[in-house]
């Protein structure tokens, strides 16, 4: 299962995100494997929640290398590294919109479903690109605006 979401998460508290993850990720977690983008925002928050609250397999996927990710994202991966099944570094020669979209497609291609947490009111974003790609691939997806 792929998780995608906004990097802008400051408008809600950690308790609210924990409740959302409990409601929308928790029911899928038993026996599941999650692919997460390794960026700040929803990627890191969901990674930390899943690692601490489930036994699900976790794969972190980055377009370049983990060292190129923002500090908060690197810290999240390091905090739960013992729970991460695999870190996939796609080693894009340049971090760009295209490399992030390629990462998102990679995650969807390796998943059976995508759960997206787009910023409420936003209709154009990497999250929506990922959800659209999931739809176009004929795979189920769940949209949880935040």
Image (cartoon, grey):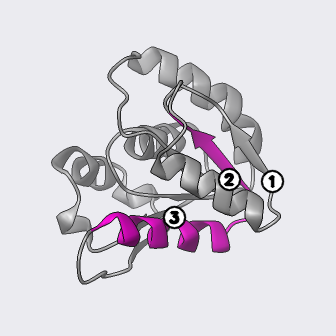
Residue at position x 53%, y 25% in the image:
121
Numbered label attached to residue 35? none
Q: Dividing the picture into quarters, in which one does residue 26 lie?
A: top right
Q: Which residues are magenta?
A: 96-118
Residue at position x 68%, y 37% in the image:
143
Q: Which quarter of the image is occupied by the N terminus?
A: bottom right
The location of residue 79, given as percent across then percent down, is 29, 48
| Residue 107 part of the magenta-drawn span | yes
Decide which of 50, 65 is in the foreground and name it.
Answer: 65
Mark 1 touches mark 2? (CB < 8 Å): yes
Name the residue beneath numbered marker 2: 114
The location of residue 62, given as percent across then percent down, is 37, 67
- Which label's residue is closer to the chain start, 1 or 2? 2
Decide which of 108, 17 is in the foreground and name it.
Answer: 108
The secondary structure type at the circle numbered 1 is loop
Name the residue beneath numbered marker 3: 104
Name the residue beneath numbered marker 1: 140
């Amino acid at each position: 299962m792929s998780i995608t979401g906004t990097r802008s998460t400051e408008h809600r508290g950690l308790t609210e995100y924990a409740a959302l993850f409990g409601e929308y990720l928790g029911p899928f977690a038993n026996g599941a494997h999650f692919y997460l983008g390794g960026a700040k925002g929803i990627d890191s928050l969901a990674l930390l929640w899943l690692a601490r609250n489930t036994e699900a397999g976790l794969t972190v996927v980055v377009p370049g290398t983990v060292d190129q990710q923002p500090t908060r994202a690197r810290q999240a991966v390091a905090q739960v590294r013992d729970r991460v099944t695999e870190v996939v570094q796609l080693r894009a020669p340049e971090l760009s919109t295209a490399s992030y979209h390629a990462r998102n497609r990679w995650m969807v291609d390796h998943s059976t479903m995508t759960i997206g947490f787009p910023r409420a009111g936003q209709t154009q974003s990497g999250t929506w690109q990922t959800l659209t790609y999931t739809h176009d691939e004929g795979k189920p997806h769940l949209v949880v605006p935040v």
